[in-house]
Image: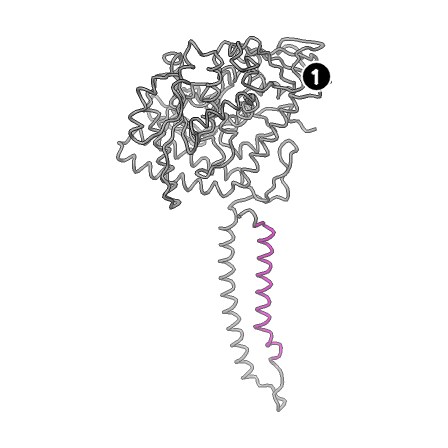
Amino acid sequence: MIHSFSVTSASRLLIAIVIVWLLVIFVITGPLIGWSHNRDDGNVDMNSNGEMILARLSRAMNELTALKAQNEELRSLLQNYLPIDLSVTSGQQSDAKSSSLKSSYFPSQEYELSRRRVEFNMNELWHFLRTKTNSSIMQFVNQIKHNMFYDLEVIEKRDNIWRKSEFKRLNDLVKNKINELQNPVKDKCGSTKKLICQLNKGCGFGCQIHHLVYCMIVAMATKRTLIMNSQNWRYAQSKSKGSSNKGWDSVFLPLSQTCLDDSGSSRISWSSSSDLDIYQVVDLPIIDSMRSRPDYLPLSIPEELTQSLVQLHGAPIVWFIGQIVSFLMRPSQEMSDYIKKQKERFNFRGPIVGVHVRRTDKIGTEAAFHPLAEYMKFVADYYDRLDLFYERNQTNTKVERLVYLATDDSSLWSKEIKPFEDMGYIFIGDSQISQTASLGRRYSIDSLRNIILDIWLLSETEFLVCTFSSQVCRLAYELMQTRIEPKSYSTKLDKSSAYYSLDDIYYFGGQSDHNQIAILNHKSQNSHEIDLKIGDVVGIAGNHWNGYSKGLNRETKQNGLYPGFKTNEKIASAHFKLFESN
């Protein structure tokens, strides 16, 4: 393994080479010490000894030249064998006083950002070309893109021991901190500081889970135990047959094992004008009603984790929210059994692409109509890439073109999938699940279980095609980031690019400004574009998926289009009390 070959080993090898080199010189030139030994007649034979010396010197020079060439070759081999541009540490101090890296090698932040940047730029170029060229040209372009992605994945795989270790470290860190926050010692629940979250926001399942995510973010930032009031939750208000629970407890584990009581000695509703620290219990409003918004609201990540997250993951805010979603959506035993049973019934397996088609109440209000054929273009592109990967690996494996289809429109199963089945695609899912998502049945226990099942299985796919205007899709994408176990058919641990959205870019409802930084100048080519200067802050409103994004230049106040590859994400961070050093 690459990582078993340490800097110490390399140094010892070079020292050994130098020692051998000196010994060779000593052996070769050693007889020169006796060049003035007397002949039998007592006189020095200058001519014969001189010729001998010149011969030996010539031979020594030849040996030195050969050794120098071998040394340069060895240096080149070592440089190629060891990770390029790696920082060396005897034990890097990790974020939030956690343990040091197990490996002495880790890629620099500049290296990781550049590697991901190449992938992003290739995708932006591909989006631009596919809107400008015909299908025959795009077949060639697609092969080039897939071939480059294969090479990028080989490069990424080089550091996967470090990457997997870091993902696990950060996953464990956040998980343990949340568990500590949510489970104070039992006799301390009456005195611990609490934050109360009402789970009664007037919106759908995905929206309500994201409301709870926001509550947990505030709890983590202020270091208060989150108490959820789910009595008025609209879902599963009646017990199902064979179930002893209803509502939240019928599908998820409680947020705490030791502290579910919202009582306290003093209580106040959230207000920016009050000193909240003096109150034991604080009632939290919905995110849209917060005034004088604190800087830790999304899209901020904990500053204590920022350095590691920026280096490790392509979308740090998505990773951070994914950790919270993973905690909140821990399935109850009944729900776990249901997921397991359905996976067995579907013969859910991989590699598989997840497709989420949201229609019903979204169409005409929050989202446009997209036929299944539009989604399948990007499913096909993913499998074409996978076929090329297998070809580059010189394997004859025939990839099944599996699709997990999640939708609230049951007519897709009868009207839109057959042409793709005829092309060899295999659709996994159930039209009955779609029917429980209809408006009339949306809040039943069956509907609740099935929407959780959809989110869960979508998050376990290798690639997600959906519309980010749907909170269900964004939940699946967030949860996907917590799945870090590599598969035999893919070694990618960072899943930030494992999606295609037909409409919006990723966002969090009620988020603060989403900003980018210009890294290249741009002169507008028409009235639809805006100018950019290096360093300008741009508030991005969306990606048009044609090489251009839309946004507001906060320096010039121009609003319009700009080439996406000319900007970088501006990562916002804030202090979280939960991650303070003890």
Residue 351 x/y as whole percent: 42, 34
Give the farthest residue toward the bottom.
41
Residue 260 x/y as whole percent: 65, 15
Q: Residue at x 51, y 62 (%)?
A: 68
Crowd class of label 1 (few under 14; some 14 to 19; many from 20; radius 10 Å)? many
Q: How is the image coloured?
A: one colour
Instruction: In this rendered view, identify the residue nearer to me: 138 or 513.
Output: 138
Q: Residue at x 50, y 9 (%)?
A: 202
Q: Regarding mark 1 in the picture, which secondary structure is present there?
A: loop
**Quick check: 351 above or below 214?**
below
Give the farthest residue toward the right.
187
Let me know if residue 25 is in the magenta part.
Answer: yes
Query: What residue is disc 1 on?
Result: 189
Q: Residue at x 58, y 57 (%)?
A: 13
Instruction: In this rendered view, identify the residue nearer to me: 547 or 348.
Output: 348
- Prevailing SS of the magenta stretch: helix
Q: Which residues are magenta?
A: 5-34
In the rendered structure, the answer to whether residue 60 lies left or right of residue 272 reads left
Residue 344 x/y as whole percent: 46, 28
